[in-house]
Image (cartoon, helix red, strand yellow):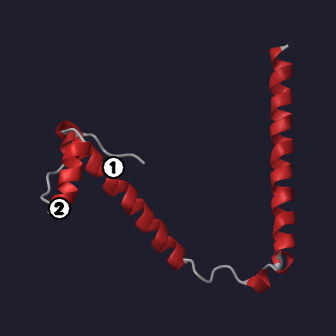
Amino acid sequence: MAIETNRSSVRKVTVTLPASLLTRLDETVPSRRRSAFIARAVEEQLAILEQAIAIEESAGAWRDEDYPDMATDEDIDRWLAELRGSTDERLAGLFATAEEAER
């Protein structure tokens, strides 16, 4: 998550917050860090919202009939084990190569 810090790209806005929320903010975040804190919070919430929208837009992209090899929980477990096994083998090979290079 990258928040722009270039002063020329920063703009002031006015927002209205419930008094109880502002009190919590005042008690928790030093005033000189408040803008960065709020920017980060907005960035995180926008990322969550954008992910939810992407998930909603992709609904129906996976059709069970297109993946008969993953019809049961056992099928999915097998696929995950194979996937993780290939990663473990790749990592073991990388570590072996690194150890050989150190010798």
Instruction: Report whether 70 appears left or right of 55.
Output: right
Residue depicted at 33% across the width and 49% down the height: 40
> Mark 2 = which residue?
17
Instruction: Report whether 80 appears left or right of 29.
Output: right
Question: In the orientation shown, which residue stands out farthest toward the bottom?
Answer: 65
Numbered tag placed on residue 18 in the rendering: none
Give neighbour class at mark 2: few <14, some 14-19, many 20+ (Cα, 10 Å).
few
Q: In this orientation, which residue lies closer to the viewer: 48 or 93?
A: 48
**CA distance separating discs 1 and 2:** 16 Å
Q: Amino acid at mark 1?
A: Arg
Numbered tag placed on residue 40 in the rendering: 1
Q: Secondary structure at mark 1?
A: helix
Q: In this orientation, which residue lies closer to the viewer: 96 or 29?
A: 29
Residue depicted at 82% across the width and 73% down the height: 73
Q: Position of residue 52 (x, y in %)?
A: 47, 71
Residue depicted at 83% across the width and 77% down the height: 72
Q: Position of residue 98 (x, y in %)?
A: 80, 25
Where, quadrant-wise, is the C terminus in this rendering? top right
Regarding residue 97, the answer to whether it shows in the image is yes
The picture quadrant where one finds residue 45 is bottom left
Q: Amino acid at mark 2?
A: Leu
Residue depicted at 86% across the width and 76% down the height: 69
Of the numbered discs 1 and 2, the one sitting upstream in the chain is 2
Q: Position of residue 20 (x, y in %)?
A: 19, 59
Regarding residue 9, the answer to whether it shows in the image is no
